[in-house]
Image (spheres, rainbow, N blue to C red):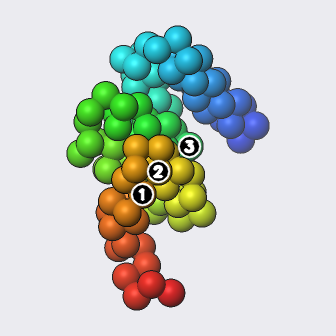
Amino acid sequence: METSKDNKEERDVLVEQARDAMQRGDRVMAIALLTQAIVNHPDNAEAYQLRGRVRYETGDIRGAKEDAEKMLQLDPQRLNTLTGDFQAEGTEKKARKHTSFLNPHGI
């Protein structure tokens, strides 16, 4: 019987393998591993965050935006990490615009 600890360890293994692939510059493998992590654990905000970053780096802006939106639905506290990624490209305002639906009144 699989426990929640086993479940978390499995999720962590896929994400760590994806991080290793990213460090090697193997974006195709990183996306594949993160997609598998998401299929297995659709509540994994970190996997969406990382896959969105890789998608952004490969020019898949639409995919990056979709992953960012899902990540923020799961864990709104990750907004700072998202804007940090976009800030490196000078597009922090775009990231905030794309995520304004989370806080439409600016509160």
Task: Look at mark 3 in the image and give the residue it sits on.
Answer: 46
Which residue, as the protein is rendered here, is positioned at the far front?
Answer: 90
Mark 3 vs mark 2: which is more N-terminal? 3
Whether residues under marks 1 and 2 lie with C-beta atoms below 8 angstroms apart, the answer is yes
At x 33%, y 59%, the residue is 94
User: Could you tell me the amino acid type at mark 3?
Assistant: Glu
Task: Let me know if residue 38 appears in the view.
Answer: no
User: In this picture, is 78 found above or below 33?
Assistant: below
* Quarter holding residue 76: bottom right
Q: CA distance from mark 3 to mark 2?
A: 18 Å
x and y percentages locating residue 47 in the rendered image: 51, 38
Whether residues under marks 1 and 3 lie with C-beta atoms below 8 angstroms apart, the answer is no
Q: CA distance from mark 1 to mark 3?
A: 19 Å
* Quarter holding residue 78: bottom right
At x 46%, y 14%, the residue is 25
User: Could you tell me the amino acid type at mark 2?
Assistant: Gln
Task: Look at mark 2 in the image and give the residue it sits on.
Answer: 87
Q: Quadrant of the N terminus?
A: top right
In this view, the mark in front (1 or 3): 1
Mark 1 vs mark 3: which is more N-terminal? 3
Label 2 Cα neighbours within 10 Å, binned few <14 / some 14-19 / many ≥20? some
Label 3 Cα neighbours within 10 Å, binned few <14 / some 14-19 / many ≥20? some
In the rendered view, does 59 fall on the left or right side of 35? left
Label 1 Cα neighbours within 10 Å, binned few <14 / some 14-19 / many ≥20? some
